Image (tube, rainbow, N blue to C red):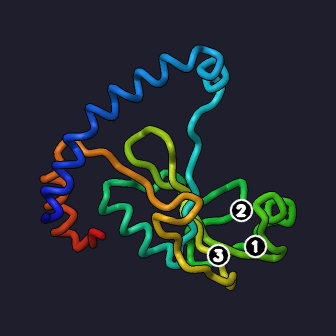
Amino acid sequence: MNLRRKFLKFLAVIPLFANNTARAETSKGSKLNDQAAHLNWGHININVSNIEASIEFYRKLGFEVFIPAIPYLGLTMGFTFNQIDSASSTALGLPDNVSGRACIMQLGNGFPKIDLTQYDDLPQLKPLNNGDLGLVRICLGSSNLISDYERLVEENVAFI
């Protein structure tokens, strides 16, 4: 089955999923909803090996640089790797004296934002696959999937 058919088949399932999700939410009661009412999306952090290439990739998807830095970490997307202060390194579970470059990207004006961070001289693990624990992918919606697919193919975005 070609990629377009897979996408269209996936889209056909979305209304069924949405109906089941709505029923599940109403059957859980309001206590959970009251607790969640205090939470909002902030950002998702994605560690990258090359910040310039990553920014270019997300721009092809329609993202834009929201803030050319992550101010609370002292990181910018410039060419200089800035050192993260010790308290922030500890809070993030990073070794002391780690340096990096970063920016915050957005798609439209909504949330979540995406923090792209490139660290200098940290050992890199293999990327996660779909069967691994942890955040393994993000999903973007489309109001015109075929048009978006064709535009991204023209931009040389690889589909897996």
Q: Quadrant of residue 159?
A: bottom left
Q: Is residue 142 visible?
A: yes
Q: In front here: 49 or 26? A: 26
Kind of element beneath mark 3: strand
Give x and y (percent) for residue 77. Answer: 56, 68
Quadrant assignment for the C terminus: bottom left
Question: Residue, x 31% and y 58% (percent of image)?
Answer: 61
Tag 1–tag 2 contact (CB < 8 Å): yes
Q: Earlier in the sequence, mark 1 or mark 3?
A: 1
Give x and y (percent) for residue 106. Answer: 45, 49
How many C-alpha atoms fall within 10 Å of the one at disc 2: few (<14), some, or many (≥20)?
A: some
Q: In front here: 149 or 132? A: 132
Disc 3: which residue: 119
Give the distance between the C-alpha atoms of the residues marked 2 and 3, in whole angstroms.
13 Å
The label shown at residue 83 is: 1
Disc 2: which residue: 74
Tag 1–tag 3 contact (CB < 8 Å): no
